[in-house]
Amino acid sequence: MNLKTKVTAGEGTQDLLITREFDLPVELVFKAYEIPDLFEQWMGTNVIKMESHPHGSYAFETIHDGQVVFHANGTIHEFVPNEKITRTFEMPGFPVQLEYLEFHKRSETTSTLTIHIIFKSVANRDQLLAMPFAYGLSMAHDRLEETLKNLPL
Amino acid sequence: MNLRRDVFQALADPTRRAILLMLTYQSMTAGAIAANFDTARPTVSRHIKILTECELLQPEQQGREIYYHINAVKIKEVADFIEPFRKLWDDRFNKLEEVMKNYQKQQNI
């Protein structure tokens, strides 16, 4: 089975690798991360702040029924158009994680994005893996429920 | 949760992963498994014990011999551990693709 999105989590390690192959030129994938309006559309969250340059900061927030259901923020350390974004990522109540996003051109119309996430500890990583709804941002209620149901707990 | 952590610990070892891989093709006795490794027999036995304890392997008595085979249900459970997370990102990136294809069309007009 050739999956477009792959997640690799080595046992006993505190990192995680997400790889995605896109039927899009690398420039467009990068734009999806760079332009707040586009980012909001695919992530399904509101962009409160996005300073896309080294030492700039960002913040996202999702509001559902008047409640903040998701909030994340961080600092951008490296920002190289069409190549890479290095940033910290923080959600309230969770340890800060470090994220390396690398954008690779495969052809004029295809590209690969790899996201290497480093967590504070193995336990912290496994906890987040076990509860993807912590990242639940965009998910409507029914989808959240579906994910909860599918959890192998 | 502790049980699951034990499973991951069991899988963290390359020899134990090699044993599991070997047993995907056929069930084997401890002796036959150990014959495939340079490691001392008691070390291999210990690995088999750990894998059995966390239910990744199932021992089965056949006459005088004990054959070990893979517990497919448990293996699947471990593999599924990542699946909801993967699915979440897959959906999100599919959405990215859709949004950007629309954006591309608009730019071309």
Image (cartoon, helix red, strand yellow):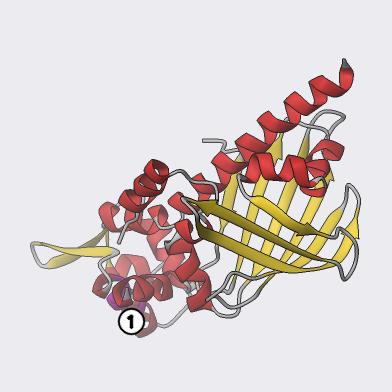
| Quadrant of the image occupied by residue A118 | bottom right
| Quadrant of the image occupied by residue A102 | bottom right
- Between B3 and A46, the one nearer to me in the picture: A46
| Image height of A32 relative to A50, above or below | above
Dot 1: few (<14), some (14–19), or many (≥20) neighbours within 10 Å? few
- Between A77 and A101, the one nearer to me in the picture: A77
State the SS at label 1.
helix
Of all chains, the one bearing label 1 is: B
- Would you name the residue on which mark 1 appears? B46
Q: Residue at x 40, y 58 (%)?
A: B81
Q: Residue at x 49, y 46 (%)?
A: A139
Q: In the shown orientation, is residue B25 left or right of residue A79? A: left
| Quarter of the picture holding the C terminus of chain A | bottom left
- Residue A87 among magenta residues: no
Residue A92, horizontal then vertical, whole percent: 56, 73
| Image height of B40 relative to A16, above or below | below
Q: Is residue B25 visible?
A: no
| Quadrant of the image occupied by residue A51 | bottom right
Disc 1 marks which amino acid? Answer: Arg
Label the magenta part by its dominant secondary structure. helix
Q: What stretch of residues is rendered in magenta?
A: B47-51
Residue B38, horizontal then vertical, whole percent: 48, 76
Give the farthest residue toward the front.
Answer: A66
| Image height of A73 relative to A69, above or below | below
Q: Residue at x 25, y 75 (%)?
A: B53
